[in-house]
Structures are given as C-alpha cells and as structure tokens.
Amino acid sequence: MGRAPCCDKANVKRGPWSPEEDAKLKSYIEEHGTGGNWIALPHKIGLKRCGKSCRLRWLNYLRPNIKHGSFSEEEDHIICTLYLSIGSRWSIIAAQLPGRTDNDIKNYWNTRLKKKLLGKQRKDQQSSKKGAQVKQEMKREVFDDLKPPSLCMSMNLYQSYWPSEYPLILTNPDIHHQEQLHVKNQVPNFNQYPFDTTSNQAEMFHHNCDEKPISTTAYHPQLANTHYYPNGDGINLFQEFNNYPYEINELVYNTTQIEQFDGLIGGLDNIINGSNCTSSSAESTPSWGDPLVCAPPQMGYEDCRRELLQNCHRDQQPSRFQ
DNA sequence: AACAAGAGCAACCGCCCTCAG
DNA sequence: CCTGAGGGCGGTTGCTCTTGT
C-alpha cells in the first residue's frame, strides 16, 4: 500500500505564487502563526494550495529577514568550506548564514559555486600541466569508471590538523588502483592495510596515525551533531565520506595544489571557533588560493574525545554517545 | 531580428524521520 | 509496539530570462 498523499493533488493549485496568495499567506501567519499544522493551514486561509507548498513558500520567500540577491565572498567561502566538511546538508549550512535559505544555498551551489570551483581548478591545471600530469590524467580516465576516491577527501580533511612530522600520502580507496597523491613528503603508508569500502576505515586510520591527528569534527563539536559520533572505540571519522559528491572527490583527487584545500578546510576554524589558523598572506581573512598555516593539534585524542562527549552531553544528545 | 542554448531559480517530488494515538 | 500523518530535507524539474550566433 502506498503512502496517502498529503493533499488532493487534483484540487490544489500549482506553479508560481501570485501576489494575492503571498499576501494571504503572509498576513495570516504573521497574525496567527502556522498553528503547527501546515496541512490544515491553506484550508483555514482559503488557499487552494498544498500545505507543503505553503510551508516552502513561507520559509523560502515570505518570512521576515530573508536575504535575497547575490552572495558575498565571505558567504561563498563559508558555503564551500562547510560543503567540503559536511557535504550537501544545506539546512546546516544555511544555519551558518543568517537570512539565507537552504534552497537558496543549494541553488547557488549547483548553478554557480560548483562551476566556479571546478572552473578555477581546471584553469589552474591547464596553465601548469606538464608531461607527468598528462600521464596521470590519462590514467585517471580509466579510473573514472570506478568508485570515487572518497578517502582522498577524508584524508585531506585532516591536513590542516595534521602534525607536520606526520606527513600524508593520499591513497585511492580501491587497493587495486593505488594511484597516490602526495600531499607532503611520505609516510605513513596506508597501502599496507587492506582497504575496502565496507571495512572500518576509522580503525585503519587509527592504526596508522598512532591516535595523534584529530578530525576537524572533533575540533568542532557543533558539527558532530550532524553525523560524526564517537563510538566505544573512538571517533568514527569516516562513516560519511563515501557519500561525498563526486566532483569534490574528483577535485581533491585531481589537484596538485593542495594548498587551496588547506585554506578551505582550515577556514573552518575562522567560521566556527574563531581563528586557530593564520593566513600565510598578509591579510587576516583567508581567501581563495591563500594557504593557511595551521598549528598542530594542541589536544590529544583523549582530550578531544572528552570534549566531544561533553558537548554531546550538554546538547542532550542520545545516550549512545556516552 | 530571430532562434537556440545556457543559466538561474522557484517550486515540486518523494523519501526519511518523528511523534501522537 | 505499531501505524499513519505531518514536517523536514535533498534532489530534480521546468519555467523564465539572458546571452550567443
């Protein structure tokens, strides 16, 4: 048995809202509120609209303090940084941008920011392409048919917080296609641990890193509310990374100019916690292609875990976190 | 000037989660 | 505990406007 529709689709108006409908909805909600029931709302006002449609119209367009118009550079930066950190959780990203709706941000990302990012990347690549890179690209064409190299993304997230004495090699998750992206020098060697997409990736990481590096999430417990939860054995750092959008994986995988992503990820601190990183340029505010120099973690694994748990507890998270 | 292609965005769709009965 | 309604959210669609030829 299928699910009952929320409204009689044959008898509701669809398509663009008229100014009259907007005015009706706006004045009613401003006077009476939503009443906690969107489905019943249109009947009360005499609107021939689906309740969900009313909700969407109110949230995305009619409610007060909605910001329309172009996005600022700072907003761009926040969106990109959070997208790289938490993926397409538009409502969470929107919560960091007062006046912006998740729908707005989603549209903005899909139509402009994504292209801006990829366009910049391609331009950079074209201008600096050398023989080895061409070779790598040819090799990658074969690889395109395979699973996106999600681990590259997750590894890269660590970069800003990775102690310089523990340089990284990014490795494709597919053990049969170990094309490596050298981020800094060498070691540790992830290849020695058999990898498949269903294995416990956190365990592997844990093993290799001697518990020293801490995830961005661990530094920013606010984001832990989204998905990254500690379990009894530590923090499950990787459970979401397989869901990373392909183009971001590709971007990270493809890039030889990791500094750009350092800047993005390191910028999280500026956005959420206040600065823990310093820009390598004279400006205090990081911008595109502006490498950030981040201090190595001051906290150890246990410290971070404790802090994360405290935050979970404070925010009344379910007991599974304790 | 006319047409096609592309870009931008509002709105819809449908799945998932929560919670009341 | 089970079920179904409502809300929330991410993905997608399709209309309108702009730009290029």
Image (spheres, coloured by chain):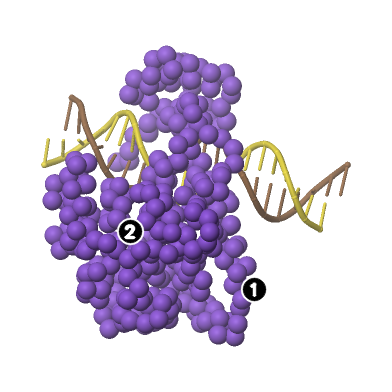
Chain colours: A purple, B brown, C yellow
Q: Which residue is mark 2?
A: A216
First-in-chain label (2 vs 1): 1
The quarter of the picture where residue A243 lies is bottom left
> Residue A234's spot in the image, x, y percent?
18, 62
What residue sits 63% from the left and 73% below the top? A126
The quarter of the picture where residue A236 lies is bottom left
> Residue A318's spot in the image, x, y percent?
17, 45
Q: Which residue is mark 1?
A: A127
The quarter of the picture where residue A189 lies is bottom left
What residue sits 27% from the left and 56% below the top? A218
Task: Give the secondary structure at mark 2.
Answer: helix
Residue A176 visible = yes
Residue A318 visible = no
In depth, the one of B14 and A279 nearer the eye is: A279
What residue sits 29% from the left and 74% below the top? A196
> Residue A163's spot in the image, x, y percent?
32, 70
Work out whether A319 lies above or below A280: above
**Which subunit holds the residue at mark 1?**
A
**At label 2, which amino acid type do we have?**
Thr
In depth, the one of A236 and A161 nearer the eye is: A161
